[in-house]
Amino acid sequence: MASGVPDPQQARQTLARFYGAHPAAPGERQYLDRHIGRYLKTLAALPRQPGALLDAGAFPGHLSLLAARMGWSVTGLGKMDGTFVGRDFEQRMRENGIEALHADLERDPFPFPDDQFDAVFFNETAEHLAYNPYHALDQIWRTLKPNGTLVFSVPNLASFDHRWALLKGRTIYPLLTEPLGATFHADIAQRHIREYTLSECRYLLTGQDKYLYSFAIRKEIMDRSWDGLFHTEHGYRRQAKNVRIGTVLRDVLTRIFPRCRSNILIQAVKPPTYVRMSEADLTVEGFYPEEMSGTGDSFVRRPLEACWMKTNARIAIRLPASGRRVARIELLLWLPAPASLPPLPVRATVGSAPAAELAIAPSPEPRRYSIPVPPEQRACSETLLLDMETPGWIPAQHGLAADTRTLGMMTHLKHIALVYES
């Protein structure tokens, strides 16, 4: 049965029963003491009506359980192969009615169909990702229903604690004078690889140019759950010995300057105006056969099956019968060519109207390009035609003697995004 957000005491009692006969992992109860306030703010960011919820990066499972007690049907996802999360965690999740599935959030496709979840948690996880946080957000976007809610949180790189430590000439990391186990306290998957500022979170969710996804931010909360006078790295400890000049300043200044608070919590939605068209919706001409771009981590973070464009190419996009007006076409373009090649000019036409002049510089990685649809073409009801023209280049003239084709840029044709007018 659905219920509201619990109070701190109710949440602690619920989580105390969560473990059952299974021992808590080292540091897990300490983590709970520190994060209980954040948990309640996170739960409050969910829609009022429970539905299907994905917890991406579910360990230690506290939020999954609390959301399940509120009536949500929860699926947990993360590395559950024994390298990071022990088997006890997976078992106790299932004993509490929560499905737990294994996936590498940075590399694997999420094992769900499109538009499955009403909400997704992606909390205190992005800072642990060393390889590619965009992939996880792309998969979250794909599996969210239109207008579905993403609840996203990370520690704030620009927090008072960090600024205060640096002002005093100290590190923001554990001191090297501590024992080795305290200084390097976990394997690399558990450490904070990269923390983020608020503007960087906005870029990850709405402004990034590496994948075809876009979230719409509804609410930004700069959270003070760790910033009170008596808050320590071990949680709330109301003891006089914990009060120092730094904690007094933190308590005062984080009330006045929200951007100095310790945690960033964002509620965002998957806008129905941003739609990815699948390969089945596209008819293409003027491309060479599909091949792999990139051969591994040393060359490109995200190898893609893609097509080289010829000097002239056409993409016909079959539109759904929605009656909406298309404002922009977005696609991934790049030029995995020697740096000696100057930027490649590409002229884009939509329908019969000029739309954009692009310059694609050599790069091994894709970039998202946006092509505006001229006003007279926006009411197209069946098929939208995108034509692209370029003078091309010949690999053999740039040290790649085996390839004498005349090429344009590379394009990912598995899907292309349409941005509709609001």
Image (tube, grey):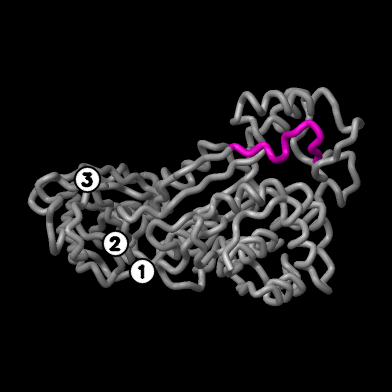
Q: Provide the secondary structure element on which disc 3 rests.
A: strand
User: Alpha-carbon neighbours of circle 2 within 10 Å: few (<14), some, or many (≥20)?
Assistant: many
Which secondary structure is most common in the magenta stretch?
Answer: loop
- Identify residue type, mark 2: Trp
Pointer 2 residue: 308
Q: Is residue 240 magenta?
A: no
Of the residues tagged 3 and 1, which is closer to the observer?
A: 3
Q: Position of residue 3 (x, y in %)?
A: 60, 61
Q: Nearer the viewer, residue 142 or 230?
A: 230
- Where residue 329 appears, as percent x and y from the top left, is 25, 52
Residue at the image position 36 percent from the left and 69 percent from the top: 291
Range drawn in magenta: 222-232
Any mark on residue 291, and which? Answer: 1
Mark pair 3, 1: CA separation: 28 Å
Instruction: Determine crowd level at label 3: few under 14, some 14-19, many 20+ residues with C-alpha closer than 10 A.
Output: some
Q: CA distance from mark 1 to mark 2?
A: 8 Å
In the foreground, 163 or 324: 324
- Residue 229 lies in the magenta stretch: yes
Label 1 secondary element: strand
Q: Is residue 212 above or below residue 71?
A: above
- In the rendered image, which quarter contains the N terminus? bottom right
Residue 326, visible in the rendered structure:
yes
Location of residue 157 (image quadrant): top right
Q: Position of residue 189 (x, y in %)?
A: 69, 58
User: Could you tell me the amino acid type at mark 3?
Assistant: Pro
In what element is the residue under mark 2? strand
Labelled pair 3, 1 in contact (Cβ < 8 Å): no
Dot in front, 2 or 3: 3
* Total tally of numbered discs in the picture: 3
